[in-house]
Structures are given as structure tokens and as C-alpha cells.
Image (cartoon, rainbow, N blue to C red):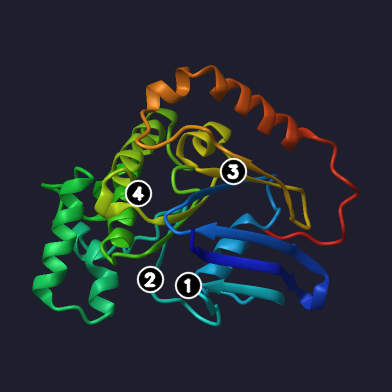
Amino acid sequence: MTSVIVAKKASKLFLDGAVVAFRELNIEIAEQEVLCIVGPSGCGKTTFLRCIAGLTEISEGELTVHGKSVDGPPDGVAMVFQHFGLLPWKTVYENCAFGLAMAGAPAAKIEERVMHYINLVGLQGFERRYPYQLSGGMQQRVGLVRALAMNPSVLLMDEPFAALDAQTRETLQEELLRIMQLPEERKTMVFVTHSIDEAILLADRVAIMKARPARVKEMLDIPFGWPRDVETVRSDPRFAELRSHVWRQLQSPPKKAAAGSAL
């Protein structure tokens, strides 16, 4: 399969090398693959995502998206943030349409795409509401619609459900899984999470990261194919085995940390 995202000995350093986010990462992510990244806090997971999105540059090595070096926001890449990132003075519809409007899309196209995804995630009827009038789960749905409306080929997810209560989190996991399995919505996805269960449920592969400076400790293949049903996956004996394995890998005593850290 074609590799969409390729990192070769990619490193990100801050303060002239005093702070190391990640060092010599080697990762290849195939077209329409879902890669979940788990690892200790501060090991550079979010920084790696920001580098893919072109929001910050790597310091050493290579990082390409669709074969082109990342030196700014790449075409076809959208990111969903942990803390929603909604504009409080704009309505649900205006927030969802923001990216398309900034790209200069015609009003008719904006309405078509935004309303399609608003309906897809169950936000119909809330188009004229403001973020403060929504629950946390609904705000995150708005963030997801804003990204999906751009029709990205690559979707970056930075712990998008971490701030939600457990029930809402599971509901949105199921919603995302449902959307991912629609043939027209299947995308290359990089999903950062602290939840082992979430990673196993959503991923084709799970990258288990070492403590800072981050490197890939293990790349774990997930044996559940597509289409994927939440209850079927959770009740499979392999789910518990995988969860225990990832937990043990994350709990392995880390080497003495290098000076500096980064989120």
C-alpha cells in the first residue's frame, strides 16, 4: 500500500536541543490506515501530530505527507484538537464552515458539505446555537464536523475525547467508528490517545511510545478487521490480551530521562 505519511529519523528539539520532544522517529502510515499513538505524558505525541499538520517544523530528519516535505500546513490535512478550539462568537454552523470559508469555497458548497456532516453527527437543529449553549460532547462534534467538511485525506486527532465524561467518550468513539466505516469517509488517520481501550478499538496499528525523548517502542498490529463492531471487539478475548500487553509495555521501567521534556 502507498505510504501517505513517512517519518525518517525525525526529531524535534526545542531551546537549542535542551528540550527534546521526540528523537529519530521512524514511522510509515499507509493510505486509509488508522494509527493510534499511545505513550507516557510528555513523550512528544502531540508535538509529532503538530509537525505532521505543519504547525511546527521538525529539527532533524525527514517528514513527508503525500511524498512532499512538510514545511507548512500540507494540502488535505485537517486536525481535531483536544480542547475543541471553537470560536465562541460564532454559531455552530459558522464554526463548522470556518475552514471552508477561509479557503474561499462558494457558499453553496459550504452549505452542502457542512449540513451533510452536521446531519451525520447528529447536530441538526443546533446550527444557530453558540458553543456555550452546547455540552462538551456536542462541542467536540462541531470540531469534528469542521475538520471533515474540509474533505481531508489525512485526519489528525489530538486526544479529541480526553476532556469528556466516560459515557460521552464511548458514545463519540462509536460515532467516529461508524463514520470511519462509510466508504466515502474512510481516511488516513493518526489518533493520539492515553486510552488503551480507545486505541485498540479504533486502530489498524498502535504505536507504543517510549518515555521522552520519544521513540517507537513497539508497533502493534490490531487483529480486528473492518467493518468493526464495538461490542464484538470488546467481547473478543484478544481485546483483553492486547490491553494487558500495551499496559505492560507502558509500565516498563523507563531509562533515566534526558534533560528537558516536551508535551
Q: Earlier in the sequence, mark 2 or mark 1?
A: 1
Residue 131 vs residue 34, the one in the foreground: 34
Of the 4 image quadrants, the one containing the C terminus is bottom right
The kind of residue tagged 1 is His
Identify the mark nearer the N-term, 2 or 4: 2
Kindly identify the residue that appears in the image at 31 percent across and 43 percent down: 181
Q: Please state which amino acid type lies under the numbered disc 3.
A: Val
Disc 2 packing (10 Å; few <14; some 14–19; many ≥20):
some
11, above or below 1, in the image: below
Disc 2 marks which residue?
76
**Quadrant of the rendered image containing residue 12:** bottom right
Q: Amino acid at mark 4?
A: Gln
Q: Residue at x 61, y 63 (%)?
A: 48
Which of discs 3 and 1 lies nearer the camera? The answer is 1
Residue 206, numbered circle: 3
- Disc 1: CA contacts within 10 A as few (<14), some (14-19) or many (>=20): some
Residue 134 x %, y %: 26, 46
Q: Which residue is mark 1?
A: 66
Question: Which callout, 2 or 1, points to the residue nearer the camera?
Answer: 1
